[in-house]
Structure formats: C-alpha cells, structure tokens
Image (spheres, rainbow, N blue to C red):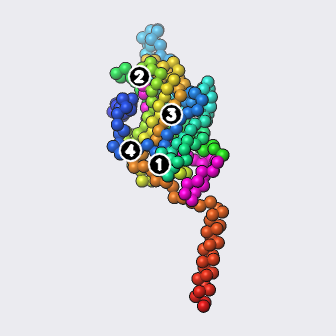
Amino acid sequence: MTRLTISLAAAAVAMAGAAPAAADITSFANYSGVGGANMYWQRLGTTYSSVGTPAQVAASQASAIATAGGHFFTIATPTSTTPGAVAAMFTFLNPGLYTLGALDASYRFDATATAGSIAQTAGGFVYQPIMSGSFSFTYTGTADLHVKQAVYHTGANLLSATFAGGTIAGQAGATSGSANASTSVPGETITYSSDFIDFARTTDQDLAIAMSSISHGLAAGRNQALRSFAATTTGSFSTDPLPRLTAAVPEPATWALLTAGFGLVGVSRRRTAAA
C-alpha cells in the first residue's frame, strides 16, 4: 500500500506539471512520433461481473483482481495492436550533440504490468502501475554522424534503457495523459545507455512520455486494469547531472594514420639518438 501511495503521488505531481523530483535534473534528449498513434496499452485479465450469486460475484472479483495487468508497447502503424518498432525523430539536448538536430530513429518500447496490477482512481484521475520494461532508439539515418573524433553510423544506439516501476496517469475519461518513471520514487529504477553519452556519474534518472489523441479516453473497470487504448506520444529523458559525452574513439582509418604517425616519431627519435 505504501508503494502504491507513493506512485500515485508521483503521478499526480507529474500530471499537475510540478517541478521535477530532483532540483537539478535536466533533460538530455527528447523524441516526437511520426505519423499518428505510435503506442498501445493493452488491458489484460478477466472481466469483473457483479451479476450472479454472492459466491459467483466474489469469485469474479477475485479472478479479475488476480489477473489484472497490461502490456504497453510501440506499434508500427496507427491501427496496429501488436508490438513493433515505429519511426521517430530523436534529439539530443546536450551541448556538443544538440547541433546534430532531429535524428531519424527506430523507436521500440515494451513494458508490462504484471498480474494483480489493477488501476486506481483518486481525485478524478486514473492511475495504472507499470512494473518493468525497456525501450530503445536506434539511428536509421544514412548520413554518418560526426562528434569530435568519433563517427557514428546507421544502427548506432542513440538511447536505450531498462526500467522498473512507473505509472500511466491521466484525468478519467480524458484523451491525454502521461507515462512516467523516476529513480527519485522508492522502488523505481532506470538504467540508461547510449553510444553517444555516458551515464556513469548521474545519480537521478527520469523518463516522461506525454500521450495525446488517446482512443476511447482513459478509463478502468472495477477491479481491472486500465482499458485498452492507442495514443500519439512524445517524450523526454532527464538526469542529474547531465550525462557526459562518451570519450571520442577515432575511426579505424584514423587509428591507422595515428599509428603510422607514432611509428615515424619513433624512427625520428632513434635516428636522433644514433646521431
């Protein structure tokens, strides 16, 4: 119960547009979807029925609660209801990377709410716990990306993460909402990785997905998970402090030139010593 109360409070703060949990937390990247609905929440579990004998109603309630859960994932097309990668535009906000601009990316998100994760309502809002998941943004552009001495190609890991905890939240019946997770909430974890930036020194991590054009509106039946819906999403990712750029590693051809240069320096030093 304590864990759920904390999650609901965190979700309420996010929906109200309050300040981030950590005072110095800063967004280092964001994304926008391409082509309409790009994520889908699929309700799982049996349906609760209040019709029947007291024993039948009690059995229906127990079954609904025990099986309530869901699956939250990206969809390849706006009408799809199965997991798939979707096109997105990904932008780094770090100094040194922002100049790369909006990058073509393949976005894949997959998270589950395990059995027993019923939706909760409070103050006109509905909240759905998400237990664990992962996401990735893979560079799909054809042009090489140059960052100092490093060169990144198609297929580079722009950003990926695994996480546990988090909440889908929104006003009941609304067609907009959010999905959030933050390491400042006890029990929630986020582990970021990227070919471009290093998270080793970061202490707080947040992810925030804004949902719009939600089909059917946010709603949950009694003793059940949030009702299924599709949504158009954008998102942002934050840490405290900002992650550093990954140490630049020269291309193999550059290494060959450097190695040759070192060799010439060695020859020169030996000749000087012999003289």
Name the one closer to the observer, 207 or 147.
Answer: 147
Give the label on residue 94, or none: 1
- Residue type pointed to by label 3: Thr
- Depth check: give the residue in front, 132 or 198: 198
**Alpha carbon distance from label 1 to label 4:** 13 Å
- Label pair 4/3, CB-CB below 8 angstroms: no
Location of mark 3 (residue): 234
Label 4 is placed on what type of residue?
Ile
Nearest to the eye among marks 3 and 2: give it.
Answer: 3
Residue 171, which numbered label?
Answer: 2
Q: Which residues are magenta?
A: 143-171
Q: Residues within 10 Å of mark 1 (few under 14, many from 20)?
A: some
Q: Quadrant of the N terminus?
A: top left
Name which residue lies at 61% across and 69% down.
258
In the rendered image, the vertical position of residue 250 relative to residue 195, given as above or below = below
Up-down relation of residue 128 to residue 158 (above or below):
above
Which residue is the site of mark 4? 25
In-image side of 255 versus 41 (left or right): right
